[in-house]
Amino acid sequence: MPRSVNTVASRARRKKVMKLTRGYFGRRKNVWTVAKNAWEKGMVYAYRDRKAKKRNFRSLWIQRINAAARLEGVSYSRLMGMMKEQNIDINRKVLADLAVNHPDAFKAVVKKAMNKN
């Protein structure tokens, strides 16, 4: 009995990967083993960097908040501590947006956080 290898499925699987590597440079786009390795490595980088992106943005937001807070005469850590004391729950993304695009609103938040009632 002849050996069954299901060429249709394996060809389709390879074709799918080759289509995904179309824009790559050199053999990465047209040699199956090299293309497969390049695509798999790319997927690893994509997974890793989706996590890194979150860290980078949080870091950026903190820097923006710190810069705006220092213009108001308070450091980032003191501001966040005072906000927690006053039960002001604004996340860093929104706070950074206020600091950059709506400085008056940011000043109001800082003033509210500094009130000792």
Image (cartoon, rainbow, N blue to C red):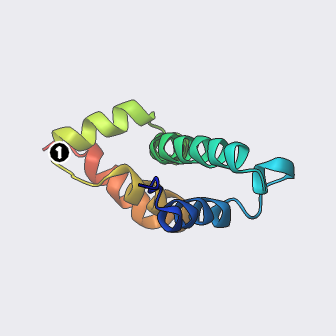
On the question of residue 56 being in view, the answer is no
Q: Position of residue 29 (x, y in %)?
A: 77, 56
Kindly give the residue lying farthest to the front in the view shown. Answer: 1
Q: Residue 81 versus residue 50: which sits nearer the camera?
A: 50
Q: Residue at x 87, y 50 (%)?
A: 26
Q: Residue at x 54, y 45 (%)?
A: 60
Residue at which label 1 appears: 86
Task: Quarter of the image for the N terminus: give it.
Answer: bottom left
Q: Position of residue 39 (x, y in %)?
A: 62, 49
Q: Position of residue 5 (x, y in %)?
A: 47, 55
Relative to 16, say whether 35 is above or below.
above
On the question of residue 39 being in view, the answer is yes
Q: In screen coordinates, is 31 left or right of 60? A: right
Task: Quarter of the image for the C terminus: give it.
Answer: top left
Q: Position of residue 10 (x, y in %)?
A: 52, 59
The amino acid type of the residue labelled 1 equals Gln
Relative to 58, say whether 15 is above or below.
below
Q: Residue at x 72, y 43 (%)?
A: 34
